[in-house]
Structure formats: C-alpha cells, structure tokens
Image (cartoon, rainbow, N blue to C red):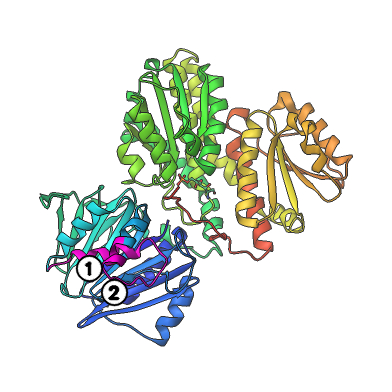
Amino acid sequence: MCGIIGYVGKENAVPIIVDGLKKLEYRGYDSAGVAIYKDDGFDVVKQKGRLSALEQRLAQKPLVGNMGIGHTRWATHGEPSDVNSHPHVGSKNKIAVVHNGIIENYKHLKERLEHWGVNFASQTDSEVIAQLAEHYYSGDLMDAVVKVSNAVEGSYALGVMCVDEPDTLIAIKKDNPLIIGVAKHGHFIASDVPAVLKHTDKVCYLNDKEIAVLKEGSVKFFDIDGEPLEKQVETVTWTMDDAEKGGYPHFMLKEIMEQPKVLRDTIQSVLKSGNNKNVIDTLDISRFNKIVITACGSAYNAGVVARYVFEQLCRMSVEVELASEFRYKNAIIDEKTLVILVSQSGETADTIAAMREAKSKNATTLSIVNVVGSTIAKEANFCLFTAAGPEIAVATTKAFSSQLALLYILSIRFAVKLGKISQVEEQKYLLEISQLPDKISSILKRIDSIQMYASECVGYKSIFFIGRNIDYAIALEGSLKLKEISYIHSEAYAGGELKHGTISLVEENTLVVALSNCERLYGKIMSNAEQVISRGAKVLLIGNCPEAKETDKLFHIGLPQGSELFSPSLSVIVLQLFSYYVAANKGLDIDKPRNLAKSVTVE
Ligand code: M6R
C-alpha cells in the first residue's frame, strides 16, 4: 500500500506532487508528506491524517523547488503519526526517501546502524532505507541505492534524493509498482498512472530491480549491475477524465455509473483483434485437467461466480481458492493445471505469491488484470485485460463487473473448444452477454428507488445476504461491498445453510437481502425468506421474480430477464448501489473506508 510520487523538472514540484498524491490517496490515507530539494538540504513537511491536512500545513508554510518526492501512507510499521510519515531523511540530512512496501529485515539493519551510532527518528521500517543509503553514500547516489537494494529484504518502490546531487531523482522497485512519466517540462516517478496523467500520457513501467535516474532533461535506466537498459516508452490510453470524479460526489458512484460502457469495452476487447482475443484463441483448454481460480476479496468473489459458469458450461471441475490460502497450502497442481489469477491492481501481494507458487509447480497461469504493466500482468504466462480504466474508489465496482464479463466469455470459449456446447449455443450466450450493458443501464435508471430503500436501512446493526447456487456467489460480493464501506456487520450464506446455525441470529430488526435469479430455486429461496420474516426480519428480494408479492416485510427490486448464469452482473449493480447509498446516508467517507487501501501490496 502507500502511494509515492516524485518530480524533477522546470516547474515548481510542490503543486505537482500534491496533485499527484490526490490521485494516489486511494492507496493509503493515514498520513502524507513531501520533501523538496533546496540548496542546502531538504524542506520536509509531513502530517498525520488525510492529504487535506498536509495541504493546510503547506498553505501555512509554502515550499518551492524543482525537485521533490511525496508520499501518502497506509501504516504497516509504526502508528500513523507525523514522525512516521514519509519522506524519511537520514540523520545526516543528506538523503530523503519515500517508500512503498515492507522491509522485512529492517530490525536487523536498524540494530546494525544503531550500533554504528545512527539515531533513528521513527518506528518505521522505511527509515532504514534513508539511513542505510546515507551510510553507503560516497559521492554516487545510484551506487548507494544499489547497495541498499542488495541489503534489504522485502518489497519496495523507492524515490530517493540526495543533497549532494541537486538534479537527480532515483527510483527503484521490487514487488511494488513504479512507473516513470516522461513530460516536456520534466520527469516523474509514481506508484500509478493517474498521478501523472495531467502532465503526460507517456510512461515506462519499471521491472523489479531496474533503476531509473531522472534529471530535468533526461531519464536513464540501468540494471542492478549498473548496465544501461533500453526501456520502451508506452502511451497510456486512460484520460484525465477517467481519473476525475466528473461531477459525482464519489468515485464509487461514478464508477458504478460507468459500468455499461466499461462492460461494452471489455466485451469488445475479446471480440475484436488484439491481446484479449489472441489470448483466448491461443489457450488450448484441452491441455488441462483442472482449473484453479485464485484471488483476494472481490476478485475472489468473481472467481466464485465464475466457478458456477465454468462448471455449468465446460462440465469441468473448478477450484476457487483465496490467494492467501493457496500460496501456503502446497496445492495439488501440475503442468496440467490452468491457474487463473484475478486482480484489478495486478499488485495484490497474496495473488502475486499464488501466481509464483503456481508457476513453480509448472502450472500455466492466466491472469485477468486491469492495470497494464502491473506485476501479475507481466509475470503470468497469459494475461487478459479488463477495460475498466482507472478504478479509484477502494470498493471495486466496474473492475469486478469487467472481470465477470471476461470470465463468462472465457468459459464459453472453453466450452466450445471442449465440445461441451455447440456454436449455436455459443452465439446465444455471447448475444446475451452483449445485452448486459443495456440491461445494466436499465437498472441504473431505477437508481432513485434503490436510493430510497437504502436510506431506510442505515440503522441496521447486521445485514445478511442469502442466495442459492450462483446467487450465493454474488451474495458474497454484496456482503463484502456493504461491510467495507458502510461498516455494518454483514455475512453471506447459502440459503440452505440458514437452518444450520445462522437463523439463530435473525431477530426483530435484522435485514436479509435475498438474491433470486435461479428460477428453479425460487421456491427454495422464498421459503428461506418466509422463515426469516416469521422471526421478525425484513427481506429485500433482488432478482428476476415475477411472482414476488411485496408486503410490509418484503421489498422487491426486480431485475431484467436472462439466463441465471450471467445474472450476477445484474444483481451486483443493485448490491453496489444499495451499499453505496447506505454508506452515503451514514455520511461515511465512501471512497476511502477506514483501515483499507485499494491495493494490498503487503501480506
Ligand atoms: O487489486 P485486487 O483485485 O487484487 O484486489 C483484491 C481485493 O483487495 C479487492 O477486491 C478488495 O476486496 C476490494 N476493496 C473490494 O471492494
């Protein structure tokens, strides 16, 4: 977690860095800071709290300079406080550092440095980097950075400045993302593309242990042995508008509303020539006797949905594993296993580890990723890209929907290749998928009734989500969405499990959200609804249920007709809006829920 940015160029670095940090705030937001190079040292302002608190400090103490680094933090080592905020400057005031990642051997390094007389100011692991760099520095910043990189264990994306090298900003990364932005007036380092989009759409993606040396008029790349590297400058297709709220009160609402377009783009990306089509056409599913889908959080939930679709269409058994479990379980996989990694950021630490574990056992890895240039996108054997554009809100919406779309199409194509469905059936399913964006638009037009219902739900202490089969899979996502942004306790259960324990929690003033898109199971889910209503609960029924009769205990939000297999793409829109409006009515900070960060790059 954490976001870093750096700039060296003709312009004043301060507003550029602060503006960039705003775009990176989704990565962490418990403190922020900037360090600006000045003739005899660094001007550093660091502040616990949101970026706005740093901005206030900077308004009181304006800084100016042409080179600087900035950081927005999600604390791992050391509580959120002014002193633990980045940038960290070594005790000789020579070297300033921003760090995203975790230094696993920091205690050992700190002890050594303390033994040599170095005084530490903070409780962070990151300060070790600044102190160590000063220790190694003997007139060549790049040399010091290489030595630091060789000494530390763990993950890092670093921006480093030295008072003795007034025109040089150095960047290096391992297991955490870092891009280099190339603009006419100067050069940037950043954790993510939106931070630099205002200035340039030209970026280079750093690989692990590659070093970038930025000056006002040049960027040079080196490997860890100091050998020069040629790196390709890529043009980003995201625009500034993608990274702005565009008049919406929150990114989450904007991103929910973008889903028809994003789905259309994602579906198109598979149908017309390009990477996604090539990958799907190339993959020979008959080589595999097992599919494992592994991911974290919502991406895992997308995998749970996909299992129902793959198993139904391909008649092949599919395992879905939390990446944090998969990586340590000594999974039974081999060269006949296809491991599918799903990740918006492409940087989730557990999913990266799961991918590497799968590769070490000779499985073929296929990733479904939103961020081009991310670790998972680069390291997986094959990668499909969701065309969601930048997703800024911590709670995923449009990326999740695009993951579902790609997983549906993948399973349809696999089913054809395996001879499990005919080409006529394939066309029928693809047609239905191509109709999803319009169906989603029709749900979004009914936003007012969802908002009204949600506004009455702010007082619930606990909300349960139930569903059967694929409705259960999407119930998991509904529950996660609600708890992460509204802070209301919530669990998702398979409808059939209610009677095996959970129903004892149902009492007056419990809300049960029942998903019902499996026509053949409608009677079953309705009998679950009756059971909870008779124990005092209220039910919000979401689904394509023409027979549903509303009562004072049951409210129904109807969904467009269609195959149950793709119904999660419709249910999830209502679930996202419901969570959003519950949280909005509670006045919560929806885009940046407490204790969370967008990409979980640490374990
Ligand atoms: O970037 P990833 O898709 O790998 O992230 C996985 C989870 O951290 C993520 O889906 C998380 O659960 C979201 N905040 C849920 O909205």
Residue 134 shows which numbered tag?
1
Which element type, helix, strand or loop, lies under badge 1? helix
Residue 124 locus on image (x, y percent): 40, 64
State the residue in front, 461 or 12: 461
Residue 330 in view (yes/no):
yes
Instruction: From the image, tell me which residue sits under label 2.
Output: 91
Residue 445 in view (yes/no):
no
Image height check: is 282 above or below 90? above
Identify the residue at horizontal 41%, vertical 62% (top origin). 24
Residue 329 locus on image (x, y percent): 47, 30
Q: Which residues are magenta?
A: 112-138
Residue 164 shows which numbered tag?
none
**Tag 1 near tag 2, CB within 8 Å:** yes
Residue 77 locus on image (x, y percent): 44, 60
Image height check: is 420 above or below 166? above
Q: Quadrant of the N terminus?
A: bottom left
Q: Tell me if residue 477 is in the magenta stretch.
A: no
